Image (tube, helix red, strand yellow):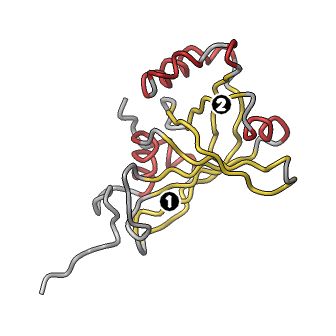
Amino acid sequence: MAIVENNRGTLAGPDMSDAAVARELVARAGLATLSTLALRPAGYPYGSLVALADDERGNPVLLLSALAEHSKNLAVCDRASLLVSEPGATSIVSAPRVTIVGACRRIPAEAQPAARARFVARHPEAELFTDALHAYALYLLEPVELRVVVGFGRLSWVTPDEYHRVPSRM
């Protein structure tokens, strides 16, 4: 009888590090769940669906509307987390995922052109929303720590340094 290995998820092979799995998830995903500390009701986690791209180091880049609750929350407290799962995954047991915990801040003006180009490359429809008229701004989530779940029985904490050392696909 053959033994089927179920703890590798659908993304990673046995030779892929957990940091590489996290980097690949962020590189592939178009959407993720951003959690911020809510103003209403005060202090509770507030999760919302956001569009996702990444910078050259793999840090998540988000295009957020000033009208959105998560943007209002971030204006008061920049601590956030981002849950990224494998696109199309259907099994909670085998679905690779990463939760990136860190500070989420507006990208400075001098870094906007590069961030905008990467974001629009991933989300061409966003070209219409990357101007001041629509009250959207680009944000960067700078990781403090990453929790990676590759599949059942394979999970770990990954440091930002381990994550950033994984080569970019772009």
In the picture of the structure, the residue carrying the numbered disc 1 is 148
Mark 2, Cα crowd under 10 Å, few <14 / some 14-19 / many 20+, is many
Q: Residue at x 38, y 61 (%)?
A: 90
In the picture of the structure, the residue carrying the numbered disc 2 is 64
- Closest to the camera, between mark 1 and mark 2, is 2
Instruction: Compare marks 1 and 2 and give the one earlier in the sequence.
Output: 2
119 to 49, vertically: above or below: above
Three-letter code, disc 2: Leu
Residue at the outermost bottom position:
1
Rendering coords of residue 25 (x, y %): 42, 47
Q: Residue at x 67, y 23 (%)?
A: 137
Q: Secondary structure at mark 1?
A: strand
Rendering coords of residue 160 (x, y %): 57, 47
Rendering coords of residue 26 (x, y %): 46, 43
Q: Is residue 80 left or right of residue 14?
A: right
Which sits in the foreground, 68 or 73? 68
68 to 38, vertically: above or below: above
Q: Is residue 66 left or right of residue 51?
A: right
Rendering coords of residue 78 (x, y %): 77, 41
